[in-house]
Image: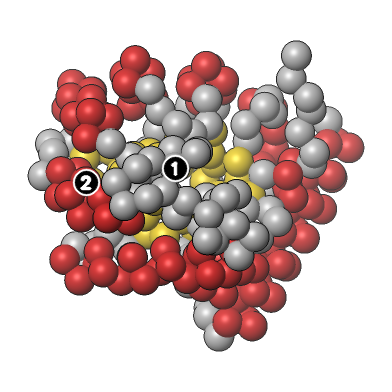
Amino acid sequence: MTDRRDELAGNLAKAEERIAAACAAAGRKREEVTLIVVTKTYPASDVRILAELGVRDVAENKDQDAAPKAADCSDLSLRWHFVGQLQTNKVRSVVGYADIVQSVDRARLVTALSKEAVRAGRELGCLIQVALDAGLSERGERGGVAPGGIEELAELVAGSPGLRLDGLMTVAPLTGEYAGRQRAAFGRLMDLSTDLRRVRPAANMVSAGMSADLEEAVAAGATHVRVGTAVLGVRPRLG
């Protein structure tokens, strides 16, 4: 366990250095960017070590992995983010532990999240996942609503009991005009965030960037970066 703690501490320090350097290069303050450590496929013991090292935000993308892990770590002061594509039959479970769902991308999901948040007596933060590889009204390959659908979905979230509209999220697309152009993709997300904040000033969270492209996300103006491999190491193959 000591070896694993040393490994995570070293990786976390390197990730922090990268974020700090990116902030300095962009003329931003380090505190403007929150590191979310994506702990998917890794055990609760790693989450505990990360908490000891000062991490406060962790993310998961599959409920079947996240629910027991969150239960095991319920005594820790952590903010849990759900970042994966979310099916409505998993909503009740996810609402039980997640503080923020970053993958809100359709009206039916909003309705389900609202119902369960009210039932649980919780206020759930929501980010609208934006698909920059989608057409005007399509969804992206990895989920998300097309830019043209943000306004309608934002109004639905903002008007739904138990939900709080926190902002936008995207994953750098693998296809379309932004494929391989992370900086341009994240810049487009920031433009969309600016449009949203004109109507909903409190929806100022912008989640973008992962281990390979966090610098581009910070340069564009992201408020949160989602880092997994750079902190936890190469993920084990499943199956």
**Residue 210 percent coordinates (x, y):** 62, 53
Local crowd size for mark 1, using a 10 Å CA cut-off: few (<14), some (14–19), many (≥20): many
**Residue 217 percent coordinates (x, y):** 56, 65
| Identity, as a three-letter code, of the amino acid under mark 1 | Gly
Distance from Cα at disc 1 to Cα at disc 2: 15 Å
Residue shown at 76% from the left, 33% from the top: 235
Question: The C terminus is located in which quarter?
Answer: top right
- Compared with 149, 65 (above or below) is above
Query: SS for tag 2?
Result: helix
Residue shown at 69% from the left, 75% from the top: 21
| Identity, as a three-letter code, of the amino acid under mark 2 | Leu
In terms of image quadrants, where is residue 139? top left
Foreground: 109 or 79?
109
Question: The N terminus is located in which quarter?
Answer: top right
Q: Are marks 1 and 2 in contact (CB under 8 Å)?
A: no
Nearer to us of marks 1 and 2 is 1
- Compared with 177, 236 (above or below) is above
Residue shown at 53% from the left, 70% from the top: 184
Tag of residue 153? 2
Q: Earlier in the sequence, mark 1 or mark 2?
A: 1
In terms of image quadrants, where is residue 172? bottom right
Instruction: Left or right? Give the position of 54 relative to 162.
Output: right
The residue indicated by pointer 1 is 140
Foreground: 51 or 195?
195
- Compared with 229, 132 (above or below) is below
Instruction: Left or right? Give the position of 151 relative to 18.
Output: left
Local crowd size for mark 2, using a 10 Å CA cut-off: few (<14), some (14–19), many (≥20): some
**Res 96 visible:** no
- Compared with 67, 59 (above or below) is below
